[in-house]
Image (cartoon, coloured by chain):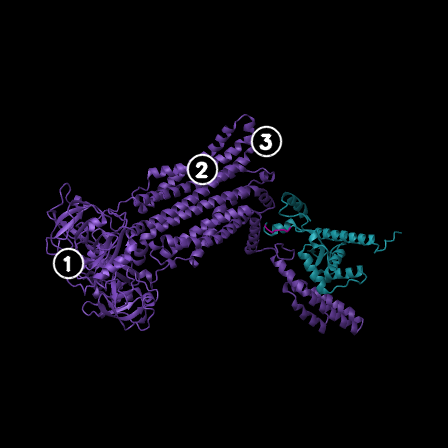
């Protein structure tokens, strides 16, 4: 996005105004009449993630998807282990939008006319940081479990 | 289009438990997804379909609550999520500005607390004074259609606003055309007997029309009829004031129809007024018909002692009514030249008559407190400027991002108004306390009930208005300043200080100049109070007890009876242990009673009554002058030999003697006064004040009581100890003479003397308080500006010191800069003072509004304090370590 360089500059000049890690763009700030306050986003505040949120973020790693597509991707990735209902899915999407973990974007060009009516979501940079932190945390947990001989060593072939 | 199954309908209905915003955003996709899931499940059989449908509904039920909470958080959070519409109208922008402002204020608690406290004091004080102004000057009077209610005055020569003669009133009422009706009244206290102890009530002798004109309703019984209050057809009836009925008669429901013995005559109570009934100049405990006014001469033409009220016809102006009534007065003057020569009439609105006298003082107080508020504004503007210097980077970024100047000004002004409104809310608390204080200080001098002075709707609205105006006032300079900042300069972190410093200096000059004006006013009021307290009343007010009584005319119907009663009373009083001297006098000083008559001296050119000098005539018993310690300057005191049958004599005061017979002895000259024959001057006594301390010295005459017997009297008793301690003994002494005689208004003369200056003292105290507050705020302002400038000039000072300037030179430089600001402020301040103190003229006594000494004193005081405030930053600057200073950026 063209704004991003400007956002970085502004952020450096005035850290109070647009905190680092914020998904909100300069455009957003300007459109809000120059006084929209942006919270200092703290990724640690979101940890640990609920399984649904974790999986939605994982499903969005490869690119933007609409809601149902996310559910299908999660189902596929987990071999049908995680199967969420519409309420769970969209409730989580709403919560993640509010927390700036994901963004709504316009439908990509390749989308079918049926898909075009749907809302597409992508992971924000902040969402990616939260995901990374969560995965680090999980790795630590697994390492701990391994040290206690609770988990089999991964086979290295 | 797929056919909707039963499940689809149920699912759509179940979706209603989600918030509407959630449904409109996700509803369609959720239904699509649910339909897909159901379609898949149906392929696996009916059981699977049933399980799936249950699962889908449970899913909705489980997630709906969190959808609601998220939505609520979204509404209240300051984050505008991507899907919430961007602000499109002003209200949205305003809401955001408000949030931003609050956060900004919370982030700088020190600044916020100082600013809010300053504002709370300023707005609180202004609101408190305004609550008085509102009660006295703005709120409508408690009469129906008060604008059409007018006082009718007689004009005697150059004296306006005089009471009227009853017969004149009668003719006015009959012959004018501008009035719906007129009413008349005369106040006098009444002796109420027949109860446990003789008692005194306030009375008003009225015409029946008075109640109609003032719109006074009766809670019980009826009003007077016109016939009952006419001289020819009078009837002994009475109306009792509601509050008196409640307290004195314990709300006795059978009072109407009963008789009251008033001044020895039985009056039948016919009515009780409605609660809170008020009558201008005439409110009393008991109302009686006018013809019962107990004064033989009370109905003579030329005896002006009644108050007349009129109600104008709709659309008639005050000027037209005055022309109307003056024309009638002219006819009366032509018909009765010996009594009415030079007597005219005028109309004044009741409001003006009641509040005109305090209006000036009130507006002066409002002005003074307004100045304090202005100074506080200037101070906060200065704080804001200092703050905006540190905020300039933030603002520059905003500007660089395309925020227009108007947008930034709007944002900064919002912050200021938020600040001032918070201050205003705190100020209302202060106003509550201050209003109470004000009522105790000056309540007695105001023509309204203390309970009427309160923080009601209009006052609160005023406070809000003042708060918003204040915020805009102190916000506008810093906002404009900040929005003008040069982007390049600030972004390169150079602070454009010059313009900002000039604005700040200007604000300090304004503060100091206004403070000087306030100090000058306070100084003048203080000096005039000192002058007033220094006035010699002409008698010794210490250890002097006064009280009043009146004899019932029916019982004391001959001059001899009255004289005997007075002589016995004087003797009884003198026999009380602890009494040094005692005498009786028609009207004691500062009792606010008194009678003045035209006086003419023998051998001087004859003048008409209205042009003649007016003499305050007092009837006294022997020993009055020695009791009061009024010196007898020439001739003799009034003695026991000056009986009714002896030669008529008079004692005059020094002013009258010197004015009438300059350079000649007054003793042996003859004067005529008060309708009596020629009286020979037998003595000259010192001048004494009678109504108030700052009155123009009155011409006074004293005649022997025996030669002018009157049923009204005051007693004056010179005591050895605390005068009020003898009240009971004095009352009993009088009861030894007449068991049925009520006595009232026991006062120590010193009480009356201090009451005279009480209002002035309150005004001086308040102005002094305001001036001190203003001075403190202004001096803090000077200190703040210099400190701030010095911090910014640390480098320069460092270079100077490095180049060899010594500490004293640096101190001189800084103080010199302060002195320049102070000098300019003093010049402007003196100019403002010259104008402002002129408004005080009516409040001053014994001093001119442009009194040089006062101006000099306050100038020196202000300059000294202000220079002292400069000295601190100067000393700090002189101790700057050049190395540290040069290294600092």
- Which residue lies under the disc numbered 2? B866
Q: Quadrant of residue B335?
A: bottom left
Instruction: Please report contact status of discs 3 and 2: CB closer than 8 Å, yes or no.
Output: no
- Label disc, if present, on residue B859 of the rendered structure: none
Please indicate whether residue B647 sits to the left or right of residue B242 in the image. Answer: left
Chain letter tied to purple: B
- Which residue lies under the disc numbered 3? B886
* Label 1 Cα crowd, 10 Å radius (few <14 / some 14-19 / many 20+): few
Residue drawn where x is 78% and y is 68% of the image: B40
Please indicate whether residue B35 sits to the left or right of residue B271 in the image. Answer: right
Measured from the top left, where is residue B623 in percent x and y?
19, 51
Instruction: Please report contact status of discs 3 and 1: CB closer than 8 Å, yes or no.
Output: no
Residue at disc 3, secondary structure: helix
Q: Relative to B378, does residue B574 appear above or below in the rendering? A: below
Q: Residue furthest front?
A: B577
- Label disc, if present, on residue B336 of the rendered structure: 1
The region drawn magenta spans A35-39
* Label 3 Cα crowd, 10 Å radius (few <14 / some 14-19 / many 20+): some
Query: Per the image, is B155 magenta?
Result: no
* Label 2 Cα crowd, 10 Å radius (few <14 / some 14-19 / many 20+): many
**Separation of marks 3 and 1 at Cα, in angstroms:** 96 Å
Residue B610 visible? The answer is no
Chain of the residue that carries numbered disc 2 in the rendered image: B
Residue at disc 1, secondary structure: loop
Measured from the top left, where is residue A26 in percent x and y?
64, 49
Comparing B217 with A92, the one in front is B217
Comparing B704 with B256, the one in front is B704
Please indicate whether residue B825 sits to the left or right of residue B61 in the image. Answer: left
Residue B704 visible? The answer is yes
Front position among marks 2 and 1: 2
Q: Quadrant of residue A111?
A: bottom right
């Amino acid at each position: 996005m063209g704004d991003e360089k400007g956002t970085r500059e502004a952020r450096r000049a005035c850290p109070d105004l647009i905190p680092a890690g914020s998904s909100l763009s300069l455009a957003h700030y300007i459109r809000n009449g120059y006084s929209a306050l942006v919270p200092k986003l703290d990724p640690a505040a979101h940890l640990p993630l609920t399984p649904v949120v974790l999986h939605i973020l994982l499903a969005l790693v490869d690119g933007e998807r609409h809601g149902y597509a996310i559910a299908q991707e999660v189902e596929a990735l987990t071999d049908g282990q995680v199967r969420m209902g519409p309420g769970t899915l969209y409730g989580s999407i709403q919560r993640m939008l509010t927390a700036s973990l994901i963004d709504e974007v316009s439908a990509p060009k390749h989308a079918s006319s049926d898909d075009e009516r749907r809302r597409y979501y992508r992971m924000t940079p902040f969402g990616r940081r939260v995901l990374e932190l969560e995965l680090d945390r999980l790795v630590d947990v697994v390492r701990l479990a391994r040290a206690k001989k609770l988990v089999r060593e991964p086979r290295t072939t | 289009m797929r056919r909707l199954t039963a499940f689809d309908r149920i699912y759509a209905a179940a979706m209603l438990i989600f918030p509407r915003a959630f449904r409109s955003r996700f509803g369609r996709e959720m239904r699509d997804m649910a339909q897909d899931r159901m379609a898949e499940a149906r392929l696996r059989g009916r059981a699977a379909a049933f399980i799936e449908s249950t699962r889908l509904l449970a899913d909705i039920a489980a997630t709906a609550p969190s959808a609601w909470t998220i939505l609520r958080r979204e509404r209240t959070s300051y984050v505008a999520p991507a899907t919430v519409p961007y602000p499109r109208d002003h209200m949205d922008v305003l809401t955001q500005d408000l949030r931003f402002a609050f956060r900004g204020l919370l982030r700088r608690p020190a600044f916020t607390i100082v600013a809010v406290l300053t504002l709370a004091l300023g707005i609180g004080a202004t609101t408190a004074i305004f609550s008085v102004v509102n009660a006295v000057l703005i709120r409508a009077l408690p009469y129906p259609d008060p604008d059409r209610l007018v006082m009718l005055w007689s004009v005697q020569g150059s004296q306006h606003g005089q009471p009227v003669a009853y017969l004149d009133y009668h003719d006015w009422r009959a012959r004018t055309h501008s009035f719906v009706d007129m009413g008349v009244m005369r106040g006098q206290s009444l002796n109420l007997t027949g109860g446990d102890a003789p008692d005194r009530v306030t009375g008003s002798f009225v015409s029946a029309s008075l109640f109609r004109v003032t719109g006074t309703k009766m809670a019980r019984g009826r009003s007077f009829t016109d016939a009952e209050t006419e001289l020819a057809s009078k009837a002994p009836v009475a109306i009792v004031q509601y509050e008196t009925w409640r307290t004195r008669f314990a709300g006795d429901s059978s009072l109407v129809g009963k008789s009251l013995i008033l001044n020895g005559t039985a009056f039948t109570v016919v009515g009780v007024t409605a609660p809170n009934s008020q009558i201008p100049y005439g409110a009393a405990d008991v109302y009686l018909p006018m013809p019962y006014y107990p004064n033989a001469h009370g109905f003579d033409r030329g005896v002006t002692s009644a108050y007349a009220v009129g109600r104008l016809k709709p659309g008639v102006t005050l000027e037209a009514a005055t022309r109307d009534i003056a024309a009638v007065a002219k006819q009366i003057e032509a018909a009765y030249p010996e009594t009415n020569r030079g007597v005219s009439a005028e109309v004044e609105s009741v409001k003006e008559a009641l509040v005109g006298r305090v209006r000036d003082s009130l507006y002066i107080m409002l002005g003074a407190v307004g100045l304090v508020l202005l100074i506080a504004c200037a101070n906060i503007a200065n704080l804001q400027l200092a703050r905006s210097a540190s905020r300039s980077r933030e603002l520059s970024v905003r500007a660089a991002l395309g925020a227009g100047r108007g947008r930034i000004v709007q944002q900064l002004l919002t912050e200021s108004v938020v600040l001032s409104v918070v201050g205003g809310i705190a100020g209302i608390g202060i106003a509550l306390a201050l209003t109470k204080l004000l009522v105790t200080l000056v309540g007695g001098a105001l023509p309204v009930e203390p309970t009427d002075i309160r923080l009601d709707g209009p006052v609160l609205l005023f406070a809000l208005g003042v708060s918003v105006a204040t915020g805009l006032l102190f916000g506008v300079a810093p906002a404009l300043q900040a929005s003008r900042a040069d982007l390049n300069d600030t972004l390169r972190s150079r602070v454009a200080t010059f313009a900002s410093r000039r604005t700040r200096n200007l604000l300090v000059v304004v503060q100091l100049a206004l403070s000087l004006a306030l100090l000058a006013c306070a100084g003048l009021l203080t000096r005039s109070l000192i002058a007033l307290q220094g006035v010699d009343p002409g008698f010794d007010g210490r250890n002097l007890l006064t009280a009043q009584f009146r004899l019932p005319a029916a019982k004391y119907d001959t001059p001899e009876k009255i004289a005997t009663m007075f002589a016995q009373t004087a003797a009884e009083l003198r026999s009380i242990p602890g009494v040094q001297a005692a005498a009786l006098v028609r009207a004691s000083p500062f009792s606010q009673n008194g009678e003045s008559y035209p006086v003419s001296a023998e051998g001087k050119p004859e003048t008409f009554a209205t042009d003649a000098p007016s003499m305050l005539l007092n009837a006294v018993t022997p020993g009055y002058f020695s009791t009061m310690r009024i010196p007898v300057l020439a001739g003799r005191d009034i003695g026991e030999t000056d009986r009714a049958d002896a030669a008529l004599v008079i004692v005059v005061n020094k002013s009258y003697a010197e004015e009438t017979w300059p350079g000649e002895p007054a003793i042996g000259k003859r004067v005529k006064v008060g309708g009596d024959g020629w009286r020979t001057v037998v003595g000259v006594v010192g001048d004494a004040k009678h109504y108030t301390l700052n009155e123009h010295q009155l011409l006074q005459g004293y005649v022997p009581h025996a030669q002018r017997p009157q049923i009204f009297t005051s007693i004056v008793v010179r005591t050895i100890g605390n005068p009020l301690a003898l009240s009971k003994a004095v009352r009993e002494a009088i009861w030894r003479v007449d068991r049925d005689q009520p006595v009232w208004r026991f006062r120590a003369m010193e009480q009356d003397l201090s009451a005279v200056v009480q209002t002035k003292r309150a005004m001086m105290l308040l102005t002094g308080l305001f001036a001190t507050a203003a001075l403190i705020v202004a001096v803090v302002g000077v200190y703040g500006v210099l400190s701030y400038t010095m911090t910014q000039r640390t480098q320069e000072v460092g270079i100077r010191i490095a180049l060899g300037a010594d500490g004293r030179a640096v101190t001189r430089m800084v103080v010199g800069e302060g002195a320049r600001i102070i000098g300019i402020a003093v010049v402007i301040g003196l100019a403002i003072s010259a104008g402002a103190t002129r408004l005080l003229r009516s409040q001053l006594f014994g001093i001119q509004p442009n009194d040089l000494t006062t101006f000099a004193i306050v100038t020196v005081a202000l300059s000294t304090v202000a220079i002292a405030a400069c000295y601190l930053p100067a000393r700090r600057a002189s101790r700057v370590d050049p190395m540290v200073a040069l290294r600092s950026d």
